[in-house]
Amino acid sequence: MDRFQCLTAFVTVVEAGSLSAAAGRLNVAKSVVSRRISELEAHLGVRLLHRTTRRLVLTDAGQTFYRRAAEILAELAEAEHAAAEGRQALTGRVRLSAPLSFGLLHLNPALTAFAEQHPGVQLDVDLNDRAVNLVEEGFDLAVRIGHLEDSSLVARPLAPIRTLLCASPGYLARRGMPRRPRDLAGHDGLVYTNVPEAQQWRFTDAKGNTESVRVPVRLRANNGDLLLEAAAAGLGIVATPTFIAYRAVLEGRLVPLLTDYRLPAANAYAVYPTRRFLPRRVRALVEFLGERFGAQPYWDEGLS
């Protein structure tokens, strides 16, 4: 069995959708493609495709094997291309998932800059605040913010994520300036729902003492930009990441509150399933994002 030919036949069948279409792309007989798939299944000892008279359907094992096989062939094609051209050009697709607000505000310009440097890379971006399953949904990479629970993922820190408590000057003129965390019990809270215990805000003072306050809720939302604009409009007080709030604070639309206290911090990570078979284009993007954001991200400049 020629493993390369069998892998190529299998990946081409999946991407073409049929044995006939794959045979046309490979310029071989349909029977040759069918034989190579059968040889591959026999070698692996698993069924990769369910064949019917009308269509082909990947088995669970086939789905897993396809992702790895396509990755291997893409890496080989990239290596051949680089050797042939005498340069280390990056080619191929990177499928990336990221949170909506961070993606629009910071990832979008970063990816534009990366794409300009590497015109051979195609970027496929999904902005969604849910935590996608990288393996099952076929993502190469994800940007995640918070504390990671899935130990099967490789995580590269990209930037620290600080949180500010903010309100508009108009709101503070009407309702007064809170001086201590407990004062928040008499204010209107704008609460981000995609975190556990969203209504419970925890503060740490300079001596390390902690205080927890249950904030009355005026508005709940699962999007940080919506909460920011509600705060800027004077609807209440929001606890928001500096990567969302920094422009509004520097412009004077929002005022940082209780700056002698710290809210829980987090990190932005680039996460991927494994270091094994990590395409060079994915590794390059991770390194690019780490350098662009870093330990002192630009969105924290000028904030106390």
Image: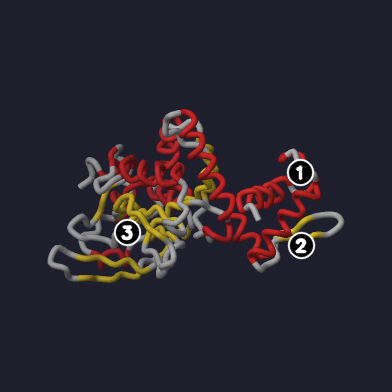
Q: What residue lies at 31% left-to-right and 52% top-to-bottom?
A: 166
At mark 3, the secondary structure is strand
Q: Which one is in front, 233 or 251?
A: 251
Q: Which mark is residue 23?
A: 1
Per the image, the residue denoted by label 2 is 50
What element does badge 1 sit on? helix
> At 28% across and 44% down in the image, what residue appears?
297
Q: Quadrant of residue 60?
A: bottom right
Task: Classify 10 Å Cα crowding around label 1: few (below 14), some (14-19), many (20 and above).
Answer: many
Residue 287: percent from the left, percent from the top? 35, 44
Position of residue 203 measured from the top left corner of the image (x, y, whole percent): 25, 65
Please tell me how crowded label 2 is: few (under 14), some (14-19), or many (20+) other residues with Cα within 10 Å.
few
- Residue 145 seen by the camera: yes
Decide if residue 21 is on the left or right side of residue 77: right
Separation of disc 3 and disc 2 at Cα? 45 Å
Q: State the residue position of label 3.
A: 266
Q: Quadrant of the N terminus?
A: bottom right
Residue sitting at the far left:
207
Q: Earlier in the sequence, mark 2 or mark 1?
A: 1
**In the displayed structure, does residue 32 sit left or right of residue 135?**
right
The amino acid sitting under disc 3 is Ala
Q: Which residue is painted at 29% across and 59% down in the image?
A: 265
The residue lying toward the viewer, choosing from 9 and 170, is 9
Question: Measured along the vertical axis of the image, is residue 142 above or below residue 29?
Answer: below
